[in-house]
Amino acid sequence: MPVTTSQQISRYYQQFHAIEVTFTKEVIKATHLYSKQVYIKCLGYHWPCIVYSSSMSGAKVIMNITTSLRDALRKSNNMISLRFSFLQPDKSDALAFFVGAKIAGSSPYGEKNPELSFVTISFTQRPPDDLIEILGELLEANVNSRKRSEERIVVTSDSLRKLLVGKVVRFEPVEGRTDIAAFAIQFDEDKVPIKYKMKINSFLRTVKIKRARGADSGSAQLQGKHDSNPSEIGGNNPTAGSAAGSASPTDPNTEDN
């Protein structure tokens, strides 16, 4: 996966900070939310809760507001910390962090579960970069899956390992070859898993970063050539001028897309 830079995280926050992500089973699986280790902390004590949804500015949780919790909230003026926890597939330890917050309100969750409440939480500060990155990647992948619906990825042995399957809608034989063929795969937008969208978004972002770095490298090499031979910069040399133009990056924000 491409490294998420501080610039990218800032863009995630600016673009998506108010958008809520509902933690359905699919989202929980895609983000690796470790539900058993999510809880509210108040005055040094903690109470388990279920994250129903979260944005970068607040969250909604389902929990049992016990007498002890009510007392703690009264003493703390509703100030709490919400603990998030996410499993890391490539590491043995879970990623965990607290977000400073305040209880903004609550309502009964439903008649079937009268002991449970639907609690609205407002963050009192910008959440840690880890939460911004997790929610931002999810939201960006969902947005870009629509923007890039017609964008194509060449299926190689490397990309095939990173992508999921689809429905073959067109088959084209390769002239002169009987052992290979070209296939067109159609996806149902409404049924594309969020995890797949995130993989596609991550793959395309990696490709664009490599292209940008390649362009930067070419530009640097060309600049070095000009420095060693200044007469080519200001002289009538259309070839050199054309090369310089084509070597510059086409989009200064390529890494953020």
Image (cartoon, grey):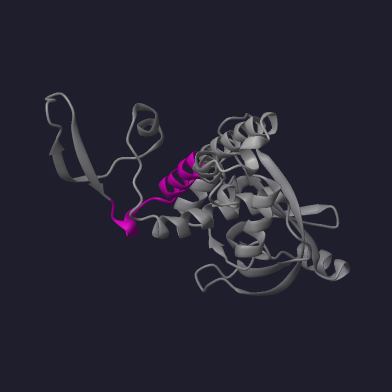
Looking at the image, residue 196 sits to the left or right of residue 49; the answer is left
Is 186 one of the magenta-colored residues?
no
Q: Position of residue 7 (x, y in %)?
A: 68, 51
Residue 88 position in % (x across, y down):
60, 36
Side of 35 where 7 appears, left or right: right
Decide if residue 49 is in sight here.
no
Q: In terms of secondary structure, what is the magenta stretch mainly?
A: helix
Q: Find residue 23 and report its horizontal and vertical position in percent.
A: 52, 57
Q: Which residue is drawn at 69% across and 53% down?
A: 39
**Horizontal relation, residue 217 to residue 162: left or right:** right
Observer-nearest of 235 and 167: 235
- x 56%, y 42%: residue: 244
Above-or-below relation of 102 to 170: below
Q: Within the image, what quadrant is residue 14 found in?
A: bottom right
**Number of marks in the image?**
0
In reply to whether residue 198 is colored magenta, the answer given is yes
| Residues in magenta, as a range | 187-207
Residue 190: where, in percent of width, then height? 33, 59
Please tell me which residue is depicted at 35% across the width and 27% down the height of the picture.
Answer: 157
* Residue 114 quadrant: bottom right
Q: Nearer the viewer, residue 156 or 34?
A: 156
Screen quadrant of the N terminus: top right
